[in-house]
């Protein structure tokens, strides 16, 4: 597995411990049962009206999803993505609530992104951390560094399919309206955790909507 820059490891370890302790002490948050990865869930993080509003924003801006290296490999990722309006009232409330829950500063996070998976669409096994040996790393290093935590909110329950599978764990999660998943992309020592590799399995009936926020090691810009 590719490692983050050595200078990021200690910071990632500190961020991991801080957020872990905070989530473990929050009544509404439950940790999913596998010690190899720090994965948490909140059952009713957003209400149905907020979810419906965000779905409309995604539909208005959706374009074919790219990978982190800006390529469009349709055998890997077939969804649509949406850079939804960061000044929208509901988006701003969502950002503030995610920061309050994790204790992480909004300055250390990317803007919320929406994703839409129509029938048959998927995203094969992938990680959320950056490959520090890749050409794109110099760009990502300069605008916030390695990703620490991922926050993903399901905006609807899919009729069939569309599950999130942590491919190296016995863990598959079906979307539910307003449900939040949070996971630490690093191990306790700050190195990438291979047990956070995950896939968006194909939607078989209906359509799947999510919003995702990625937190960084340093200030995002």
Image (cartoon, rainbow, N blue to C red):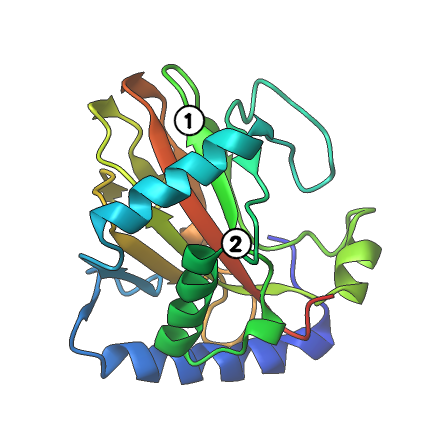
Q: Position of residue 206 (x, y in %)?
A: 28, 19
Q: Is residue 124 visible?
A: no
Seen in the picture, residue 184 relative to 131 is either above or below; the reply is: below
- Res 64 → quadrant: top right
Judging by the rendered image, the residue that carries numbered circle 2 is: 112
Seen in the picture, residue 83 relative to 40 is either above or below; the reply is: above
Q: Give the crowd class for mark 2: few <14, some 14-19, many >=20 residues within 10 Å.
A: many
Q: Residue at x 52, y 31 (%)?
A: 60
Q: How much space separates mark 1 and mark 2, taking CA atoms?
A: 17 Å
Is residue 88 left or right of 166 when viewed as pictured? right
- How many numbered circles are shown? 2
Q: Residue at x 67, y 75 (%)?
A: 218
For mark 2, give the secondary structure: loop
Judging by the rendered image, the residue that carries numbered circle 1 is: 117
Seen in the picture, residue 18 relative to 214 is either above or below; the reply is: below
Q: Residue at x 42, y 84 (%)?
A: 18
Q: Position of residue 200 (x, y in %)?
A: 39, 33
Q: Position of residue 81 (x, y in %)?
A: 55, 35
Q: Quadrant of the C terminus?
A: bottom right
- Res 139 → quadrant: bottom right
Is 112 in front, or is 55?
Answer: 55
Is residue 204 left or right of 146 when viewed as pictured? left
Seen in the picture, residue 111 relative to 159 is either above or below; the reply is: below
Give the numbered dot on residue 148.
Answer: none
Q: Position of residue 213 (x, y in %)?
A: 49, 56
* Contact? badges 1 and 2 (CB < 8 Å): no
Q: Earlier in the sequence, mark 1 or mark 2?
A: 2
Is residue 18 left or right of 142 when viewed as pictured? left
For mark 1, give the secondary structure: strand
Q: Give the crowd class for mark 1: few <14, some 14-19, many >=20 residues within 10 Å.
A: many
């Amino acid at each position: 597995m590719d490692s983050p820059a050595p200078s990021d490891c200690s910071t990632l370890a500190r961020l991991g411990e801080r957020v872990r302790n905070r989530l473990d002490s929050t009544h509404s948050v439950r940790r999913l049962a596998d010690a190899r990865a720090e994965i948490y869930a909140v059952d009713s993080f957003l209400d149905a009206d907020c979810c419906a509003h965000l779905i409309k924003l995604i539909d208005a801006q959706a374009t074919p999803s790219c990978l982190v290296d800006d390529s469009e490999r349709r055998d890997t990722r077939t969804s649509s993505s949406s850079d939804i309006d960061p000044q929208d009232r509901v988006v701003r409330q969502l950002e503030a609530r995610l920061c309050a829950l994790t204790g992480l500063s909004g300055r250390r996070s990317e803007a919320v992104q929406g994703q839409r998976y129509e029938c048959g669409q998927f995203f094969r096994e992938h990680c959320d951390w950056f490959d520090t040996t890749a050409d794109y790393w110099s760009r990502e290093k300069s605008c916030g560094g390695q990703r620490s935590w991922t926050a993903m909110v399901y905006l609807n329950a899919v009729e069939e399919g569309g599950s999130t599978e942590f491919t190296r764990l016995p863990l598959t999660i079906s979307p539910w309206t307003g449900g939040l998943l949070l996971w630490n992309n690093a191990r306790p020592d700050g190195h990438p955790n291979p047990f956070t590799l995950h896939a968006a399995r194909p939607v078989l009936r209906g359509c799947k909507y999510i919003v995702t926020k990625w937190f960084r090691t340093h200030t995002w810009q």
